[in-house]
Image (spheres, helix red, strand yellow):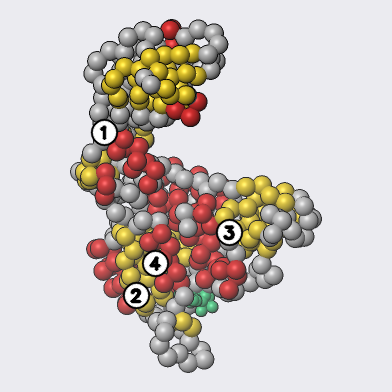
Amino acid sequence: MQPPNLKNDCFALPPGVHWTPVDEALDLLRQRLQPVVTSESLPVGLAAGRVLAEGVTARRSNPPTANSAVDGYGFAHAALGKGVQILPLISARAAAGQAFDGEVPLGSAIRILTGARLPIGVDTVVLEEDVTLQDVRIAFHDGLKKGANTRAAGEDVKKGGVILDAGHRLQPQDIALLAAVGVGQVSVFRHLRVGVLSTGDEIVPPGGDASDTQIYDANRPMLLAVLARWGLEAVDLGHVGDDRARLKAALDQAAERTDAILTSGGASAGDEDHMSAILNTQGTLHSWRIAMKPGRPLALGMWNGVPVFGLPGNPVAAFVCTLIFARPALGVLAGRIWQPPVGYLLPAAFSKSKKEGRREYLRARLDADGRVEVYHSEGSGRIAGLGWADGLVELADDARDINPDDAVRYYPYGAFDL
Ligand code: AMP
Ligand code: MG
């Protein structure tokens, strides 16, 4: 089934000259975006990294029956008394996959191994290390609680219970849970195909020759790598210069084979900002003036029904805008529930006097004392700082004087799924 199309105004922000706060822009994205991909059924073993299109219920309980948590001896707790316990062993054994189908008489014990179903007449197990074995009897001290060293049926998961919700991206640990409760196939979304296009006359492919006035394309390989980390299908759309006819042709082609497009460069409103110009005249443009540093205007819009995220050309700004806006937005387009990053309040290792009226993201990492240090430059062309950092520190919209040991919010790159 084909999901409904996005509306052309899904990126519209409040009109006027005011700079939109980050949270307001995120709320609007959250309200207006929806999955744009169809679903398919996959074997659980192939579904890691995919997003569930439907919630999943347990086909059976885990564990399916009560069983032993240790290697030892099983018996009925009701037969125990005070002091040293001596119980005769029956001549049978219960092991995982080799259940004992008979009954253990009250006052007797059976050799039992980890994972073995508890036989009839057994509700408690004593650890083999706590037992003296002689002839066919065991001796151990009193004090065991009823049910000791056993696992109850369904104590982990009950049959029929919801174990994972639609919109959840499957992690390796989820695969274990699905397998354990007998789920063999899951309904997951197809991969979201996301194109990456670089623009600008000065940009040349990385690795080749470049004159002094040319700039190697850093954004495209960076963004393609980010998308791959997010489990999306990254589509390399190459590079086009500052030429509207060629930009149009590139977008037309891209819209045929992708579900969303990331472009970098030319997103402001200057003479050479062709990305925003062409979206404005031939697609839909919403020029985002976000109260955020690094930022500058972003050009968001639709091209032939495909959402376009026109990122700034500066690699640092392109990277941060991708993590803050494109990550949750692409997640929803790909079927995920909206995923805010989870940050930590940690002591600062820096001082800064921050202006009012915009959100700031600084390249940051933890020092040996677990305090947050920031990169020595906030310049948004300083690519080296991205790799120096292990994450970003977020300074809220209001003015603030930060001194060492003040709490600041730190997001490790992992909070952005990197
Ligand atoms: P723009 O947003 O087009 O005004 O570009 C801002 C800055 O980012 C300029 O210095 C560009 O040369 C630079 N830039 C644009 N695209 C890229 C890219 N793909 N890789 C590295 N730098 C870029
Ligand atoms: Mg440019």
Mark 2 in CB contact with mark 3 (< 8 angstroms): no
Q: Position of residue 280 (x, y in %)?
A: 40, 64
The residue wearing badge 3 is 391
Mark closer to the chain start, 3 or 4? 4
Q: Nearer the viewer, mark 4 or mark 2?
A: 4
Disc 3 from disc 1: Cα separation: 39 Å
Element class at badge 1: loop
Considering the numbered disc 3 on the image, is that residue within a helix, a strand or a loop?
strand
Q: Residues within 10 Å of mark 1 (few under 14, many from 20)?
A: some
Closer to the N terminus: mark 4 or mark 2?
Answer: 4
Mark 4: which amino acid?
Leu
Q: Which residue is at 63% across, 53% downward?
A: 410
> Which of the marked residues, 4 or 1, is nearer the chain's N terminus?
1
Q: Which mark is residue 238?
A: 2
What residue is disc 4 on?
Answer: 224
- Check disc 3: other Cα within 10 Å, few if <14, some if 14-19, many if 20+: many
The amino acid pointed to by label 2 is Gly
